[in-house]
Amino acid sequence: MSLLAARRLCNVGFRTAALRAPVRGMAGPPIGELAERLLAAKKSTGKSFDDIADECGWTNCYTTQLLLGQAQLKPTSRDKFSKALGGAVAAGDLDTLEVAPMRVWDDEILKEPNVYRTYEAVTHYGNALKLLINEKFGDGIMSAIDFYMTVGKTVGKQGENRVVVTFNGKFLPHIEQNVADNTCASPNPK
């Protein structure tokens, strides 16, 4: 079975399971009607993503991900999130947001110009990013789990608007796999 066929089969399984589940067990981006209701609540407040982020103490990207169902609302943040949206979010929707989401993406998003240009920039500069990270930190990667992302705006030297995207991820070094450090016995005894 090809990787693409396996992925499609897996996605069908997730969608089927989600349709049977009485409460969201997972969601693909955006989470349909819930995302529409959350974005409508945001719109009704007249607040920007930045306004809500500032009020809640989050990054603007995390706030937007939460409104799209791609981040989990922590119970300790429920009240401030609800208040930031003017109390317009139903308790059931807040409950749903507290479930760990299925963080997936639809291939169609790559057709959206903002997304494909960002993807193009990351892939174009990919080799340089890899070499710079390795030179500064050693052999390893930037985490996308212990990670912050913000989108900002600045003005260039000619007065043009410029987009500033900041990735702030924890560095995760690759390890030397010493047998003495392995905390799980091998299933293949000598």
Image: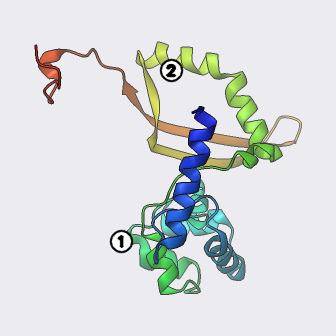
* Circle 2 residues within 10 Å: few <14, some 14–19, many ≥20: some
Q: Nearer the viewer, residue 115 or 165?
A: 115
Q: Tell me: residue 61, above or below residue 1.
A: below
Quadrant that contains the N terminus? top right
Q: Tell me: residue 154, above or below residue 101.
A: above
Image coords of residue 49 (percent x, y)? 65, 64
Q: Is residue 181 visible?
A: yes
Gap between marks 1 and 2 measured at Cα = 35 Å
Q: Give the residue at x 65% y 41%.
A: 165
Q: Nearer the viewer, residue 170 or 15?
A: 15
The three-letter code of the residue at mark 2 reads Ile
111 sits left or right of 104 in the view: right
Which residue bears the numbered disc 1? 76
- What is the tally of numbered marks visible in this picture? 2
Quadrant that contains the C terminus? top left
Q: Quadrant of residue 75?
A: bottom left
Image coords of residue 118 (percent x, y)? 73, 37
176 sits left or right of 35 in the view: left
Q: Is residue 70 visible?
A: no
The three-letter code of the residue at mark 1 reads Thr
**Secondary structure under the numbered disc 1 in the rendered image:** helix
Which residue bears the numbered disc 2? 133
Q: Tell me: residue 38, above or below residue 8.
A: below
Q: Give the residue at x 75% y 43%.
A: 110
- Lower position in the chain sequence, tag 1 or tag 2: 1
Question: Which residue occupies the extreme front position in the image?
Answer: 1
